[in-house]
């Protein structure tokens, strides 16, 4: 009990470290169990804090999820922001950025897998960027560019989520850099505006 009290006192003295530890534990928990399966109690236990300290820093589970996503998808958000800031941004650059990001981040791929299994709250910062990207593309629901963009996103995610499965019928070529490069070229071409 005394060790737990000392840990809590030490955590109170370094709130930035506590917050970082909670976010790291949450990311692992969300990647392992999805949003619905993640437990605030397990996140607190993994971070070495109390549930109330998790709630103090992040409020409800949805806010923790949003903060966790924001913390771990910064390179992807930066690519979206660059696209939005340029007058003639190429939507293919967004697909290339997502492809590269997913290639380098297997835990994010796990989050996508879980997100595809059920509903997850979409953080406001993602909704806002999504709306701005679609506006910049002049994409309305069911418009050709919106459909192509959605198909390219789904194919990008699917490539990384199911590549091991594709190895069965296609062999080791699915892990070959040349194949990966050709897949990316096809995906980027899908969203280029004629």
Image: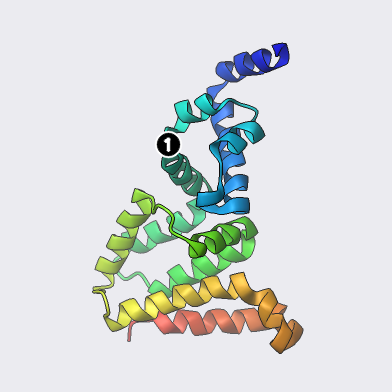
How was this image coloured?
Answer: rainbow
Please name whichever residue, 122 or 143, is drawn nearer the observer in this view of the structure. 122
Report helix, strand or loop for mark 1: loop
Location of the N terminus (image quadrant): top right
Residue ID at (56%, 63%):
113
Instruction: Say whether residue 154 is left or right of residue 31.
Output: left
Q: Residue at x 45, y 70 (%)?
A: 93
Q: Position of residue 177 (x, y in %)?
A: 69, 78
Image: 51 above or below 149: above
User: How many dots with numbers?
Assistant: 1
Q: Is residue 143 left or right of residue 161?
A: left
Q: Badge 1 is on which residue?
A: 60
**Residue under the image location 38 percent in, 73 percent down:** 90
Give the image quarter of residue 40: top right
Res. 177 in view = no
Residue 129 location (% of width, % of height): 33, 57
Q: Residues within 10 Å of mark 1 (few under 14, many from 20)?
A: few
Q: Quadrant of residue 17?
A: top right
Q: Is residue 16 left or right of residue 173?
A: left
Q: Residue 163's x, y, as percent?
A: 65, 76
Asked if residue 38 can be seen in this view, the reply is: yes
At x 67%, y 78%, the residue is: 165
* Quarter of the C terminus within the rendering: bottom left
| Residue at far right of view | 172
Q: Residue 33's x, y, as percent? A: 60, 52
User: Compared to 112, does 22 lie above or below?
Assistant: above
Q: Quick check: 122 left or right of 186? A: left
């Amino acid at each position: 009990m005394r060790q737990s009290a000392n840990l809590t006192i030490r955590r109170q003295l370094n709130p930035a470290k506590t917050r970082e530890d909670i976010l790291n534990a949450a990311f692992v928990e969300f990647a392992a169990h999805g949003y619905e399966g993640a437990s605030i109690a397990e996140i607190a236990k993994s971070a070495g804090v109390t549930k109330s300290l998790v709630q103090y820093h992040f409020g409800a589970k949805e806010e923790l999820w949003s903060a966790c996503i924001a913390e771990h998808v910064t390179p992807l958000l930066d690519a979206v922001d660059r696209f939005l800031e340029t007058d003639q941004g190429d939507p293919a650059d967004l697909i290339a950025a997502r492809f590269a990001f997913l290639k380098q981040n297997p835990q994010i791929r796990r989050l996508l897998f879980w997100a595809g299994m059920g509903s997850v709250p979409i953080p406001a910062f993602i909704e806002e960027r999504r709306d701005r990207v679609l506006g910049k593309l002049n994409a309305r629901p069911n418009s050709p560019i919106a459909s192509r963009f959605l198909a390219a996103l789904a194919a990008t995610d699917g490539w990384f989520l199911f590549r091991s499965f594709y190895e069965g019928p296609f062999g080791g070529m699915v892990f070959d850099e040349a194949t990966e490069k050709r897949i990316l070229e096809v995906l980027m071409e899908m969203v280029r505006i004629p």
